């Protein structure tokens, strides 16, 4: 018996990093997983790896910045598996690296289109489907410790991740009475390709930087974040909604 037996779950950004770890953990725990990403080769690889280990998974290419593709993603999940019970809105872009006064106008659209607008579009269409089914559901929006504590020189990412928490709490107020629980995970520094790319971009040394971002003195493994996400999506968290769970190695307590 798995924590998500029989649940149909969408994982956005499931082609690598935290999304990949989440998709695999959900499948191990009995979920039928729909992996959504713009990375077709990565998404198909993860889907095939889940199937090879006996899990159920399907891939759909979706650009979450486009409402029609997000709706198509949800429709694909329902057409493939009959319904939608769980969703993890995880897709994101690498953080920006300039203060407000130095950023280009197009940088604002590029990051907000994915990290804020895109995730809100996912939330919208997932909620429409779950409300139509009338059976409740669970949604987890992936924010960040940057959504709790601002970081210097990446104002767009910080703003977007604060916005994800605001969207989570507002959606919970509107939809929890209908049996749909909406929560957020705020990961700390997680050892993913996106983090490694950011460290290289900002010329930061991984070992020493990890000690600045965690009381445990290391980066999180993506599966450690996925465990928190799975708990929030499972019936074990049946009385939890509108909350932000920091899975951050103690960073926000520092």
Image (cartoon, helix red, strand yellow):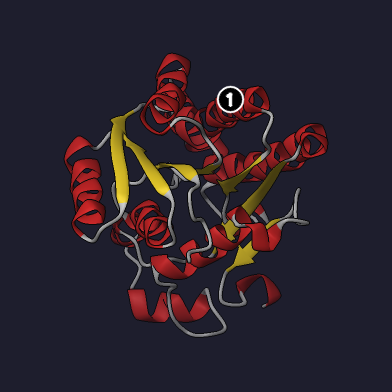
Residue at figure coordinates x 54%, y 27% from the top left: 117
For this view, does 140 lie left or right of residue 197? right
Q: Residue at x 40, y 34 (%)?
A: 81
Residue 51 at what x, y percent from top left?
23, 52
Residue at the farthest top position? 68
Residue picked out by circle 1: 129
Residue 86 position by quadrant: top right
What is the x, y in percent for residue 63?
Answer: 36, 26
The reply, left or right, for residue 97 in relation to residue 200 is right
State whether residue 211 is above or below residue 79: below
Vertical position of residue 213 compared to residue 173: above or below? below
- In the image, 166: left or right of 186? right
Nearest the camera: 228 or 204? 228
User: Which quadrant, please, contains the C terminus?
Assistant: bottom right
Residue drawn at point x = 24 percent, y = 37 percent: 39
Q: How many labels sit on residues? A: 1
Q: Residue at left 56%, top 37%?
A: 100
Q: Position of residue 21 (x, y in %)?
A: 36, 60
Callout 1 environment at 10 Å: few (<14), some (14 to 19), or many (20+)? some
State which quadrant residue 187 falls in. bottom right
Tell me: residue 235, above or below residue 251: above
Helix, strand or loop at label 1? It is: helix
Rendering quarter of residue 30: bottom left
Residue 84, x across and y down, in percent: 52, 34
Could you tell me if residue 201 is visible in this image?
no
227 lies above or below 129? below
């Amino acid at each position: 018996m798995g924590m998500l037996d029989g649940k149909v779950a969408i994982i956005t950004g499931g082609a690598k990093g935290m999304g990949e770890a989440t998709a695999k953990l959900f499948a191990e725990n009995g979920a039928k997983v729909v992996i959504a990403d713009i990375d077709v080769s990565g998404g198909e690889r993860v889907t095939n790896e889940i199937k090879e280990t006996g899990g159920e998974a399907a891939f759909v290419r979706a650009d979450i910045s486009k409402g029609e593709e997000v709706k198509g993603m949800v429709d694909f999940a329902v057409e493939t598996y009959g319904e939608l019970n769980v969703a993890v809105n995880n897709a994101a872009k690498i953080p920006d690296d300039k203060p407000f006064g130095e950023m280009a106008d197009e940088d604002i659209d590029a990051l907000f289109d994915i990290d804020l607008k895109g995730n809100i579009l996912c939330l919208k269409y997932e909620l429409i489907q779950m409300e139509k089914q009338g059976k409740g559901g669970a949604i987890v929006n992936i924010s960040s410790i940057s959504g709790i504590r601002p970081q210097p020189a990446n104002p767009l990412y910080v703003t977007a991740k604060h916005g994800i928490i605001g969207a989570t709490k507002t959606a919970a107020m509107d939809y929890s009475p209908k049996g749909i629980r909406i929560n957020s995970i705020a990961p700390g520094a997680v050892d993913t390709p996106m983090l490694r790319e950011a460290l290289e971009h900002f010329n930061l040394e991984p070992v020493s930087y990890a000690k600045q971002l965690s009381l445990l003195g290391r980066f999180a493994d993506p599966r450690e974040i996925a465990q928190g996400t799975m708990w929030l999506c499972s019936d074990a968290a049946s009385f939890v909604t509108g909350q932000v769970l920091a899975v951050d190695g103690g960073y926000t307590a520092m």
